[in-house]
Image (cartoon, helix red, strand yellow):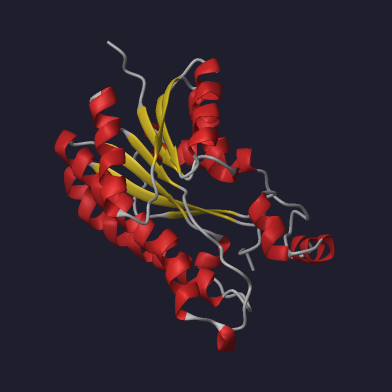
Amino acid sequence: MNDSPVVLVTGALSGIGRATAIAFAKEKARLVVSGRRAEDGEKLAAELRSLGAEAEFVQADVRFEAEVQALVERTTARFGRLDIAVNSAGHEGQPTPIVEQTVDAYASIFDANVLGTLLAVKHELRAMSAQGSGSIVNVSSTMGIRGAAKNALYVASKHAVEGLTKSAALEAAAFGVRVNAVAPGPIQTEMLDRITGSEENKLAMLATVPLRRAGTPEEIADAIVFVASPKASFMTGEILRVNGGRTAA
């Protein structure tokens, strides 16, 4: 009997999601990884298998409920259960002043970050509540607790993710399921490069981090693995902020 945890990771094809999938693979978890790009997904699944994990890629877009439901059902059909779900799919949008924001920009960011997280938690919790156990980890951001000029929509979406996480935790506790979030600060990913737009802007942002550097995707993955694990068994409804001290002041 294989007692390795069954782990589902959305947004697994790059950045924090990819690093998280690799971290779980190194612990020999049974993995389903998801994203929108089939070729990249199959390559990732093969890489995870080379690390000794059972792994499968399922193409899905978290903005569409039928795809999310099928993703969770595919996971439980393959492995018989779902122990850990990491919801890292998201979209940052373009830095834009509020007076220039559009309805389309709102939909693009909120559909990916808020609706996508809601749909994932909905179907993951259904699977986990039926088995009486499980751990869900959403990926938020330092922007889930503070503001940022020209990023109002992204900031608002991450505030929403944190509120959703806390509310879901209160409901899930009755079923033996924990729901938490990890909120990274500036992490050296393609998203950070897009948000800052230039090396000068990135250096200026990193100057606001007490540890004076960007974090790595692997550091966030380690935090996610911890929060998801039995080592954090009394933690639910919490937001773990991993940001080099950026929100300490």
Q: Judge whether residue 159 can be spotted in this image.
A: no
Q: Nearer the viewer, residue 239 or 121?
A: 121
Percent from the top left, x then y, of residue 122? 25, 52
- Residue 5 lies left or right of residue 173; in this view the side is right
The quadrant of the image that shows the N terminus is: top left
**Residue farthest right in this picture:** 200
Name the image quarter holding residue 83. Answer: top left
Q: In which quadrant will I find the C terminus?
A: bottom right
Q: Which residue ends up furthest to the top in the rendered image? A: 1
In the depicted view, which residue is nearer to us: 220 or 51?
51
- Residue 72 appears left or right of 182: left
> Residue shown at 62%/57% (left/top)?
185
Position of residue 81 relative to residue 61, above or below, is above
Is residue 209 visible in this depiction of the protein?
yes
Residue 222 lies, with reference to residue 79, above or below; the image says below
The spot of residue 13 in percent (x, y) is 54, 40
**Farthest residue, direction bottom:** 99
* Residue 74 position in % (x across, y down): 28, 33
User: Residue 59 at what x, y percent from top left?
Assistant: 40, 39
Taking the image as shown, residue 175 lies to the left or right of residue 15, namely: left
Quick one: 176 or 196, which is closer to the camera?
Answer: 196
